[in-house]
Image: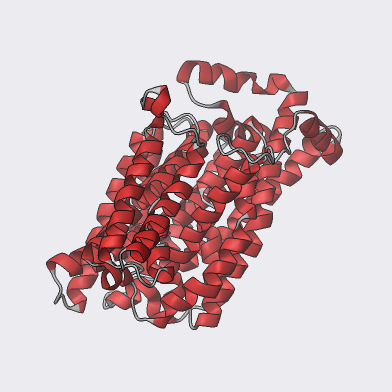
Amino acid sequence: MHSLDLGVLVVYLVGIIAFGCTFYRPNRTARQFTIAGSSFRGWTIGLSIFGTFLSSNTFLGIPGKAFGEDWNSFVFSLSLPLAAWIAVRYFVPFHRAGERISAYEHLERRFGAWARTYAAICYLLTQLARIGSILFGVAIGLGALTGWSLATIIIATGVAVTLYTLLGGIEAVIWTDVIQSVVLVGGALVVVGALLVAMPGGASEILSVGAQSSKFSLGTFRPDLTISSFWVVLLYGLFINLTNFGIDQSYVQRYHAARSEADAKKSVWLAVCLYLPASLLFFFIGASLFAYYEVQPALLDPLRERLAIEGGALSDQVFPHYIVSSLPPGVGGLIIAAIVAAAMSSIDTSLNSSATVLVADVYRRYFRPQADDREEVRALYGTTLVMGALGTGTALAMIGVASLLDAWWTLSGIFAGGLLGLFLLGMIARRARRPHAALGVSLGVLVILWMTLAERLPEMLRSPLHSNMITVVGTLTIFLVGATAARLRP
């Protein structure tokens, strides 16, 4: 790593951490820490949501996926408009109608305390998987660029993000996300420009080489749910994105942080309109990298030799290798800063929302119902630290996984699999009560565990469906079982 690149990275890190810490308020209330007094405009919230979407899983995982396979995963992004429309039409007004900062308090009034606790646990496990995969992703990139150990990078990044999230609260999260989303897009555009210039035949050669190797394929359109077909990824994307926009605590907090319901709705559409072309940009980077090294295969020899000794997936490390070996000094530093920004803009959101869930749905619900505002703020600080430490530990445990994007999709599908089904049951099936919901969740969790552990079971007992169908089947099982039980035994 060139000293100029390192200088750019250090300046960026120091600047963004210092900026986040400027939002520290010694007399902050719990509502200021979690929703900033509902003072943000829609464009600010939208950029923050967009920055959260563009994690290091996007910045490194998507180009790696496109390099090693094709554009099948882009279908996930194509589900965003439908998920956003449903969320804006039903979920945003639902959450804004009450004063509940917690997205899961509603479930207690609908089905009892167990439902609220179940949802909180699912959410916290999902965020631990998210923080872990993102920290691990940025460590892969920086490790390839700097030679530093993955563990060192994970710990240093985890401490840095936890620090400004702890001091600045939701204000620091949103405003740093706004800055980092600009850095992210700028970095991606620079990479695309550099690849177009570096290719002897320019864009036409990238398209030609990519087409010959089926790099732009969206997957088979056959109605086959046993492979990663177009329809499997579309269904998976719809259910995961609906979970994000509809019931994810980090999004619900942003809806409350917006000045009005109209601003909250605008933020959803702005994030979608920005993410679709940005996602396409990263897939194009992956296909361009494939073409670049296909016509100049010797340029990959140093990376292959290193991986033969150290291990790791070529697809996950090819982008960092390109940055450090092919970009001029200074420019590489900008891209490295963008990778770090991608990680930080997602981790800070997860930390703040997880702390809110721990305090609202666990601490205040079971331990200190009468806690005053000062005590709640102290609890928010403490739980932010706890989630930062646990997320960092999760990232350390992920060292050595084969594919970053596959690891994140699998974990999020498992932990979030049943959450949407429970919410839909409460919102749609008016007759459903506690026993119906409990039956649906019980069977849904069993189905999720069965599909997750399918590879360890005898062949005759395995699930025939693709692993991305776990969250789809789990959600439908909980909803359909609960709704059917409510009709049969009201």
Q: Quadrant of residue 270?
A: bottom right
Q: Which is nearer the eye, 62 or 160?
A: 62
Residue at image coords 37%, 40%:
395
Q: Quadrant of residue 229?
A: top right
Whole-percent x, y for residue 14 in the image = 45, 55
Q: Which is nearer the eye, 105 or 154?
A: 105
Whole-percent x, y for residue 157 in the image = 40, 47
Residue at image coords 64%, 61%:
274
Position of 265 with respect to 443 (left or right) is right
Q: How is the image coloured?
A: secondary structure
Q: Is 151 located above or below residue 293 in the figure?
A: below
Q: Is 373 located above or below residue 486 in the figure?
A: below
Number of marks drawn: 0
Residue at image coords 21%, 78%:
373
Whole-percent x, y for residue 132 in the image = 38, 44
Residue at image coords 42%, 57%:
480
Q: Which is nearer the eye, 109 or 130?
A: 109
Whole-percent x, y for residue 56 in the image = 51, 46
Residue 73: tell me if it is visible: yes
Q: Is 456 located above or below residue 260 in the figure?
A: above
Position of 416 with respect to 379 (left or right) is right
Considering the image in quadrants, where does the N terminus appear? top right
Q: Quadrant of residue 3?
A: top right
Residue 249: tell me if it is visible: no
Considering the image in quadrants, where does the C terminus appear? bottom left
